[in-house]
Image (tube, grey):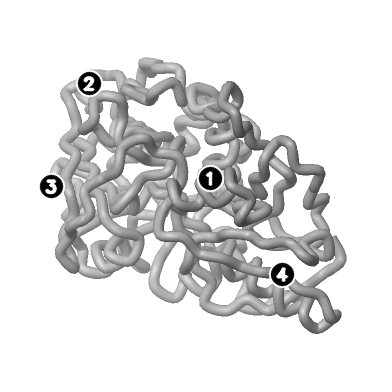
Amino acid sequence: MPTHFTRRGLLRGITAATAATTLATGLAACGGESDAATATDSAASGSVTVGRVSNGAAEQTTLGVSEVKSISAELPAAVRKSGKLVIGSGTLPSGSAPLGYVGGDQKTLTGSEPDLGRLVAAVLGLKPEVKRFTWENLFVGIDSGKVDVAFTNVTDTEERKKKYEFASYRQDNLAFETLKSADWKFDGDYRNLAGKTVSVGAGTNQERILIAWKKKLESEGKKLTVKYFQDANSTYLALDSGKIDAYFAPNPSVAYHVTQTASTNTPTANAGTYSGAGASLQGLIAATAKKDSGLAEPLADAINHLIEHGQYAKWLAAWNLSNEAVAKSEVNPPGLPLTDS
């Protein structure tokens, strides 16, 4: 794609997407809702089950995984002594399947992101404790030390590196979701958005990219209308009724929703993807910890252990996300730039 644009202070969140159940909305400024790990989610048990109560989004799979002493020895003393890994999940007020959402039992947080957090905790010999937050309060939790690491679709950005350190684990791709009956494709070209009305989540990386395209089109005398909705249900009602032409969201969320609407009266389709890092860089999703916490290295080593021993591939396959695999986890790899070069 030929266009370049400036991006500062980029944010990236799990957008509200297809979740049949809404998570609780109340949250104190630094608090969170805890989702206690079960006995099967521990290094001591030697196994972690992924894809539980997923409402058909994943194939439930039990993976053999246990502590790797050489990796757990890398942990900061305070974390190792605590015996637990507090995992932040930015899934309040509503989750985003398949990344993180309330499962079929109406209470358990399921999804690809908390599942990977549990796998990593097992390699580190720690009990996983998943806490749910709003997107904004997730970072407050990291800053305050109430959260050790976020596994919640956080994009690696150069702006965020001022406060956080990263261990990458998945490609970051965005996608346009349209009605299947619509005769429109993105085709990697912002100019194809001229005359369209597109919804996007506020405060997200995809919003910043879309707004940059909007300004670009305006400079060319063309119009792109951007609309916001409070939650996923409102967004999809707008799409179904023709009030918007497309929804710009994380590719996993779009891929999931397309499968869920296939047998309905208003099936949707993926109208094209785009790297979360823009035209010149493949975006990356990363485990996110406080800068200088000493966690990025052991997190990356734990992820690479899972990659090397096959659990990583099985985790992705269980959640139908194999096309977003990375060859290896990297500590603070190049992220979304402060400015495009």
Q: CA distance from mark 1 to mark 3?
A: 25 Å
Q: Residue at x 27, y 47 (%)?
A: 87
For marks 4 and 1 on the same chain, the one whose residue lies earlier in the sequence: 4
Whether residue 86 appears in this view of the structure is: no
Sequence-wise, which precedes: disc 2 or disc 1? 2
C-alpha separation, residue under disc 4 versus residue under disc 2:
49 Å
Cα–Cα span, label 2 and label 1: 25 Å
Residue shown at 33% from the left, 33% from the top: 110
Q: Nearer the viewer, residue 87 or 239?
A: 239
- The residue singled out by tag 4 in the image is 224
**Front: mark 4 or 3:** 4
Q: Residue type at mark 1: give it.
A: Ser
Q: Give the numbered dot on residue 82.
A: 3
The answer to which of 265 and 154 lies nearer the viewer is: 265
Q: Which residue is mark 2?
A: 40
Q: In the rendering, at what x and y percent does residue 36 appear?
A: 16, 36
Q: Quadrant of residue 118?
A: top left
Tell me what residue is drawn at x 54 percent, y 33 percent.
256
Callout 3 secondary element: helix
Please name which of the two marks, 2 or 3, marks the residue nearer to the observer. Answer: 2
User: What separation in Å lies between label 2 and label 3 (alpha carbons)?
Assistant: 19 Å
Q: Amino acid at mark 2?
A: Thr
Is 50 rendered above or below residue 13?
A: above
Q: Are marks 1 and 3 in contact (CB under 8 Å)?
A: no
Q: Amino acid at mark 3?
A: Ser
In contact (CB < 8 Å): disc 2 and disc 3: no
Q: Which residue is mark 1?
A: 329
Residue 124, visible in the rendered structure: yes
Tell me which numbered mark, 1 or 3, is placed earlier along the sequence: 3
How far apart marks 4 and 1 lie (CA) works out to 37 Å
Which of pointers 4 and 2 lies earlier in the amino acid sequence? 2
